[in-house]
Image (cartoon, rainbow, N blue to C red):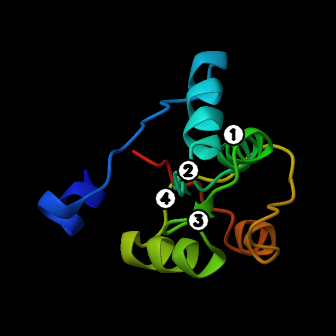
Amino acid sequence: MLAAQEHGSRAASLVCLQGQPSVAALTLLHHLHACGTALSYHGGFDWGGIRMASTVLRHAPWRPWRYSAADYRDTVRARAGGPPLSGRAIEAAWDSELPEALAQLSVRVEEE
């Protein structure tokens, strides 16, 4: 919704995966990329969110959209905290600082 509000009528098409990406969603993204579509990605700021983003990245290259360590820090600051982060840490190929920021602030931010 934020993307639509920010870009209005000039917004590109959005594909919302809602949770673990299905084979159909990964296939669609792969085909869009193969046809020359530039993909951007945003997801939840927790270990599960990074795992999902990594799965998508293995199938179709994308660039982050508001999905960096700086974005995470800004979001946590704006919300003045949130539920605690849990789970096992994972690397974020698109931003090596993101896992460190998650571990430091230890706040879970859902994409929704």
Q: CA distance from mark 3 to mark 4?
A: 23 Å
Could you say whether the residue bearing mark 1 is in a helix, strand or loop? Answer: helix
Kindly identify the amino acid type of the residue bearing the numbered disc 4: Gly
Kindly identify the amino acid type of the residue bearing the numbered disc 2: Gly
Mark 1 vs 4, N-terminal side = 1
Q: Which residue is mark 3?
A: 64
From the image, which quarter does the C terminus lie in?
A: top left
Q: Which residue is mark 4?
A: 82
Kindly identify the amino acid type of the residue bearing the numbered disc 3: Pro
Q: Nearer the viewer, mark 2 or mark 1?
A: 1
Q: Is residue 88 above or below residue 38?
A: above
Could you say whether the residue bearing mark 3 is in a helix, strand or loop? Answer: strand
Position of 70 with respect to 7 (left or right) is right
Q: Nearer the viewer, mark 2 or mark 3?
A: 3
Q: CA distance from mark 1 to mark 3?
A: 13 Å
Q: Which residue is mark 1?
A: 52
Q: Nearer the viewer, mark 4 or mark 2?
A: 2
